[in-house]
Image (tube, rainbow, N blue to C red):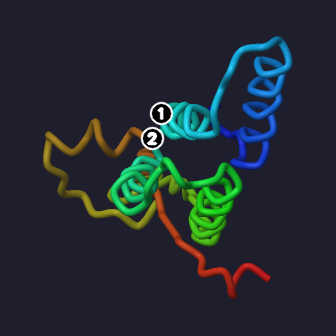
Amino acid sequence: MKKGETVFEYFARTLTIANKIRFYGETMTDVTVIVKILRSMISKFDYVVCSIKESKDLDIMSIDELQNSLLVHEQCMQGHVVEEQALKITHDSSVGKPGHGGGAFREPDTLEVDNCTKELLIMAHVEKAPDEMA
């Protein structure tokens, strides 16, 4: 499975290849296709793949059952939309300089800092629930 590819797209691509292999005379059972699909899923589906392997008998599972199970998990993962925001703050240190209301007393180690503009980047991570996205 390619990164960014949906489960539906991946199954369509995989089943097209499997059908071409069958068309040219090679025997490929549904179990073989299921095992290959589970093996090639991307890492965000690792827990789902482990769960399916542990709880289901792959010999009697159909490709449609596998697809439906993975689609449900994909939809659950898409329900948790992550929105990242960045906020840039710029601060000009003009406190203590003549003409800016500053005093006459200044410590020598702060002189260089006051002549610079400081920038701070703040990152925020917000998760939105599915009902807040509308």
Mark 2 lies on residue: 43
Amino acid at circle 1? Arg
Residue 17: image location, x then y, percent: 78, 23
* Residue extending furthest toward the bottom: 131
Quadrant in the rendering for residue 86: bottom right
Please say whether residue 97 is visible from this viewpoint.
no
Quarter of the image with the N terminus in it: top right
Residue 110: image location, x then y, percent: 21, 45
Depth check: give the residue in front, 115 or 6.
6
Residue 23: image location, x then y, percent: 85, 19
Residue 120: image location, x then y, percent: 43, 51
Mark 1 lies on residue: 39
Going 77% across and 34% down the picture, which residue do you hit?
15
Depth check: give the residue in front, 102 or 72.
72
| As drawn, 77 above or below 110 | below
Amino acid at circle 2? Ser
Badge 2 vs badge 1, beta-carbon distance below 8 Å? no
Left or right: where does residue 111 sit relative to residue 49?
A: left
